[in-house]
Amino acid sequence: MSTFFKSEAGRAAVLSLYDQKLQDLGIEYQSQTVRTQFGETHLLVTGPVDGAPLMIVHGSNGCAPIALETYPNLTKKYRVYAVDVLAQPNKSKGERLSMSDLSYGQWMNELLIHLELEDVTLAGFSFGGLIILKTLAFDESRIKAAYLAAPAYIVNGNPLKLLWKMFIPMKRYMKTAKPKHIRRFLSEIFTDDDPFALAFLSQVFLHFEMDFTPVPVISKKEAGRIRTPVTLFAAKQDLVFPGERMIKRAKRIFPSLRQAVLFEDSKHVQARVHNDQIEKFIMEA
């Protein structure tokens, strides 16, 4: 099974930060690995044993501890399953699935079946939103509701802006390892400064084989078949997946869209105040 780390030393550097973040959370959790046809999937499980099941799906170049930190209060109500997405810098080992078919949805449904979960709430950020939408398109029978924060797969940002403001600084950092380049990258996508993101992505960009495949968008036909209630959170200042255009298209193509919220002062990665609002929506459901 491939881990996509460029070296064992690089893997150790990234996973050391993973473990540090998990320790800093100060929570009780179980570590679980599920064997799927696509590879070994690692999850962190926390919250009351009798709580309703909720699966959190992190974004690109992320990991389960980051997802748990983003929505820490969900464990007061839910049995939370934070998944390490395959082919990302974390503890799962498996294939890099195609974004052009429903493989991610098939993978997620395998996890849910193995874990014997039904009436599951799904919550995901960015690339995690794509995975959730693929899950709903493949088989939504086990899903109760979906909450998507700045999700991929609905609209894409201006490619020239993304090239100059994000891709070029990223590539310059990967070539030179100069902090000024990654700081410029982070300033374009993070609403607030995030010291851990700086430390983590500084290692990921150097030691992990990232996927630069263009992100597709969901078709009107596929979106129209989804019946699971969807709540969407979009960011007005999001270069990656522009919020206003996202909400406009989502209202046209998703018959099950329950609510759409636009964060006026948010970039792609929301601030703590926005994540608190998302948590409130999920907790009050």
Image (cartoon, helix red, strand yellow):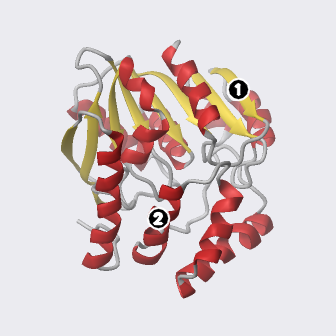
Pointer 2 local density, CA inside 10 Å: few below 14, some 14–19, many at least 20? few
Residue 75 left/right relative to 123: left
Q: Is residue 79 above or below residue 103?
A: above
Relative side of 28 to 74, left or right: left
Disc number placed over residue 199 in the picture, else none: 2
**89 is higher (above) or lower (below) than 78:** below
Q: Is residue 129 visible?
A: yes
Residue bearing the label numbered 1: 260
Rounded to the nearest whole Å, what is the CA distance between mark 2 and mark 1?
A: 33 Å
Task: Kindly identify the amino acid type of the residue bearing the numbered disc 2.
Answer: Ala
Residue situated in front as seen by the camera: 98 or 260: 260
Is 260 displayed left or right of 182 in the figure? right
Q: Earlier in the sequence, mark 2 or mark 1?
A: 2
- Residue 141 seen in this snapshot: no
212 vs 61: above or below: below
Q: Which mark is residue 220?
A: none
User: 38 or 265: which is nearer to us?
Assistant: 265
